Image (cartoon, rainbow, N blue to C red):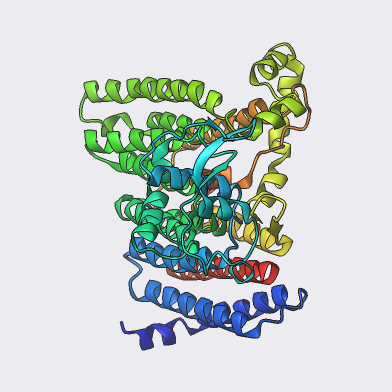
Amino acid sequence: MNIKVAILNKKKYLLVYIVLLIFFTLWFLVPNKFENITLASLLFILLLVIGVVSICYFNINNQNLHKLSFIIILSFGIISLFLSPINDISDEGEHTIRSYILSEGNLQPDYVIIPNTEYNGYEAINSVVDLANSRGINVFNTGIDDSKIDYGNNYFNSAFAQNPFYAYIAQAIGMEIAKLLDLNSIWLLWLARFCNILLYSCVIAISIKKVPIFKFPLLIISIFPLAIYQAASTSADCFFNAFAILAIAYFFILYKSNKIKYLDLGIFYGSIILCGLLKPPYLALAFLIFIVPTANFKDHQQHIISKLAILAVLLTGVSWCSYSTTQIQNSWRIDYFLAKHVNGSQQLDFMLSNPSFDIWYFFNTFLNLPTITYRLFNFSNGPNSYYSSLLTYLYSIFFILFSLLYPLKEKIRFLNKLKAFIILVIIYVGLFFVQYLTWVPVGSHIIVSGVMGRYFIPLLIFLPFIFNLNLNKINKNKFQILSITLAIIFIAAVMMLTLSLNY
């Protein structure tokens, strides 16, 4: 099927995309009195072309969803990495500093006394510190894009020393390329962002190619607007999202395998450790092994080993957490902790001595679901944060309907759905719990403080697995093309939102 036939066959979906793109462009640009028509027109044309090509590609070759995911993520990601202002993504300044330190060959940054001061920090260079300090500034309002890399020594007060180094390898490679090519300072950021989105694109493509079931739902979650926005930055959340999704993909591989391979088990548990050291509650993904049918294991020995591996995962997580909790204080956060009376040990003592509060706390994590949902469409997550209520409501409706109605061939037993739901709850409540211990004042009843929507992106995969109604009367092809059209338009809408508020 050629491109002309693809357009003719799916012209009504292309028309939906074009109309909605025009609507969101006007919705975001007109109220903000956006005057740069040239920039808006250029972005509109790029979004139009990428969207039309992606929809047509799906129509021509919907069996290669992994290629489609790569095209969508990388195309929109490249736009996002140039469009997002400097240090716009949550905590990107710190991630940028850590990326540079790794590009210099230092796996673990040193927290040192800043010369001629009483303060501590991490050694970097002037250009990188300038990037870290240029929060929310677009490239047209700074001279960083015109200046060469300044290698003079400078210091920054935080560098995410609590995160494992491997989450910054892609960004460090990008920065090293910028240094080797002797590019201007801005390319330290842009190439770091590019290598990050490239990593995410590749890992997601591999996940979708390998997974035997849930390919399309995995695609829809992977191109979630906030996931692409985070991946097109220097944030370690890109690595976390990619490998959490890879771990869940390999769970589906184990779930459908007639004869489980040790290599697949190794990738499953390895991915969990890699993402879990960044977000410890996700170590509970290891419990997905209890959903895998016993008949899928090669023999009894493999079955026992696969279960015992959970202990290795949890012990690795506990060991890392004991180390990272000391490192997190080597930053500006120590002053916040002292001022706000944040103390993990005292917070835990408070919870242990107040069981009625613990029950209240547990149920209130679910009462905060609307807040978490809203934060899934909160971009930047800082003083410059921006969001769209319209996008939040529309996408929430879209994804709820998608999760319930997507025509799955695979029928999931109720017991397996229940197990998955329990694991989802463990991770969901665990994310609140970790933030409560490490960010909230002792004894506080404000439990949602510091809990960001981006932490929950991989959990969205569980929703169609658990809550799908298996209504096979729905035409799968029409449902898929409509879903991919809407998913892409939401990404494009976020790009227009970013443009309207930052330029």
Residue at image position (40%, 62%) is 69
Give x and y (percent) for residue 331: 60, 33
Give the image quarter of residue 450: top right
Q: Does 418 appear above or below 152? A: above
Q: Nearer the viewer, residue 38 or 338?
A: 338
Residue at image position (61%, 85%) is 38
Q: Quick check: can you spot residue 37?
A: yes
Q: Quick check: can you spot residue 407?
A: no
Give x and y (percent) for residue 432: 64, 33
Question: Going by the image, does 438 lie left or right of 183?
Answer: right
Q: How many marks?
A: 0
Give x and y (percent) for residue 373: 66, 49
Give the image quarter of residue 489: bottom right
Quarter holding the C terminus? bottom right
Give x and y (percent) for residue 394: 66, 63
Question: Going by the image, does 383 lie left or right of 307?
Answer: right
